[in-house]
Image (cartoon, rainbow, N blue to C red):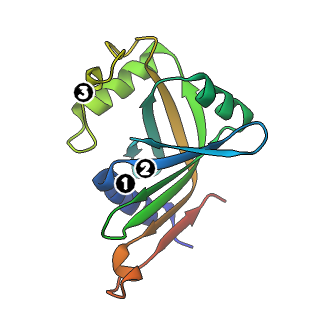
Amino acid sequence: MNSLTQVAPAFVEMAHRIVWCSAATVDARGRPRSRVLHPLWQWDGTRLVGWIGTVPTPLKRAHLEASPYMSLNYWAPSQDTCTAECRATWAFDDATRTTVWELFVNAPEPVGYNPRMIPGWDSPTAEAFAVIRLEPWRLRVFPGSVLLGHGGAVLNWREE
């Protein structure tokens, strides 16, 4: 098992390069549902936090109410994959939504984008714009070079 300080930077580099991930939640009956989302990750040297700007649909709300966890999996044609298993919480307050909105606006491409391009997202306080905060408890970084026999290392971290 690797330390968070070893895994988090490699995870963020790969996740931000791939950008889109499959994100799974489960409903009150334990049935999974996946969707494609675009998280942004912040690593400050000691803590990793992810942010998703999303429409707060009744389905997403019900799933996170039933089980406040998300599994996020990134994949690239090079066979690079990384996974984050996370606690997920809604952040509906205007201050957090504005901060996350600005994070996306100011982040470099391909992670950064202008949220106004999404219908209904006229401002960070628009009813259709909500934020999910992600706090990982498990990370895995699996470079495609390992799978293809070209070297490298698989990195794993799990919260104690």
Q: Which residue is mark 2?
A: 21
Dot 2 falls on a residue whose secondary structure is strand
94, above or below 132, in the image: above
Q: Which residue is mark 1?
A: 15
Residue 82 position by quadrant: bottom left
Q: Which residue is mark 3?
A: 114
Dot 1 falls on a residue whose secondary structure is helix
Determine whether label 1 and label 2 are within 8 Å by CB: yes
Q: Position of residue 125 (x, y in %)?
A: 40, 12
Q: Residue at x 25, y 29 (%)?
A: 105
Q: Residue at x 68, y 28 (%)?
A: 62
Q: Residue at x 53, y 69 (%)?
A: 156
Q: Is residue 2 among what the camera can see?
A: yes
52 vs 160, nearest the viewer: 52
Residue 112 position by quadrant: top left
Determine whether label 3 and label 1 are within 8 Å by CB: no
Q: Position of residue 117 (x, y in %)?
A: 26, 24
131, above or below 150, in the image: above
The 10 Å Cα crowd at callout 1, few under 14, some 14 to 19, many 20 or more, is: many
Nearer-N-terminus badge (1/2): 1
Q: Residue furthest left?
A: 109
Nearer-N-terminus badge (3/1): 1
Q: Quadrant of the N terminus?
A: bottom right
The 10 Å Cα crowd at callout 2, few under 14, some 14 to 19, many 20 or more, is: many
Give the CA separation, mark 3 to mark 1: 19 Å
What's the residue type where badge 2 is placed? Cys
Q: Position of residue 57 (x, y in %)?
A: 55, 23
